[in-house]
Amino acid sequence: MTATFDAIIEAFTRNRDRKTAEPMQRYMKTDQPFFGIQKPKRAQLIQEVLKLHPVEDLESYRATILDLWHHSHREAQYAALDIAMRSKRWITDDNWDLYRDLVFTASWWDTLDAVASNLVGPCLLQNREHQNELDGWAEHQGLWIRRAALLAHLKHKDQTDVDALERTILTEVVDDQFFIQKAIGWVLREYSKTDAEWVRRFIQRHRNKLSKLAIREGSKYV
């Protein structure tokens, strides 16, 4: 365990609020317990800890993230993501294995979405060969892994590999899971801010395959 991990858990434990914890847990539909610390307070506590116990090297970056991720309480996972995303210099292809592990152990959208769009996505831009693995994710039995294959493209803007994006959407379009259809619409909507014409043509071409939800979400800006 790293000093950063110990200090964060100590701060969270000291500031826990049982009255808030129960509704937070209920909202996320999880058996995982919460400390009951809302995002603004959580961010403040993490910032205070990092001033005293900064993550100064790659080894401590990885260890702190994993220790927090596997802690019993949900806010520890949020802290893991906060640290992972704020340390921009370490969001590199060298940590692909770490981010893959987070994807495969994420249990709900609140953690998965951040991993896919803010960690996996940037690594994919650094090494396009990872798309071969993402193609497999798109057909995986795990719902959140399939969603990650879509959301990895969410923030690529003008660097979007449209062939890969189209292939991923058409692989998953038959999946009637709400979280998949919502992700299809979301990624189309975001890319339409970069190339509305491409999205418009895509929706027209595949309208008979796309769900009403995906079309509605994806068409917002076209």
Image (tube, rainbow, N blue to C red):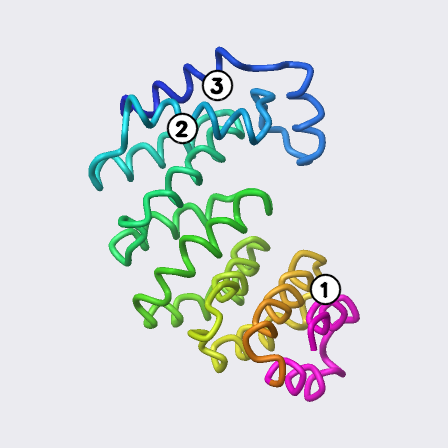
**Bounds of the magenta span?**
198-222
The quadrant where residue 146 appears: bottom right
Q: Earlier in the sequence, mark 3 or mark 1?
A: 3
Image point (30%, 68%), residue name: 127
**Mark 3 and mark 1: Cα distance apart in space:** 38 Å
User: Residue 102 location in percent, x, y?
Assistant: 43, 46
The quadrant where residue 47 appears: top left
Name the residue beneath numbered marker 3.
12
Name the residue beneath numbered marker 2.
47
Q: Secondary structure at mark 1?
A: loop
Q: Quadrant where the N terminus lies?
A: top left
Q: Earlier in the sequence, mark 2 or mark 3?
A: 3
Q: Secondary structure at mark 3?
A: helix
Q: Choose mark 3 or mark 1, whichever is in front.
A: 3
Image point (60%, 77%), residue name: 170
Q: Choose mark 1 or mark 2, whichever is in front.
A: 2
The quadrant where residue 96 appears: bottom left
Q: Quick one: 4 or 66, which is closer to the camera?
A: 4
Judge whether residue 200 is colored magenta.
yes
Circle 2 packing at 10 Å, graded few (<14), some (14-19), many (20+), is some
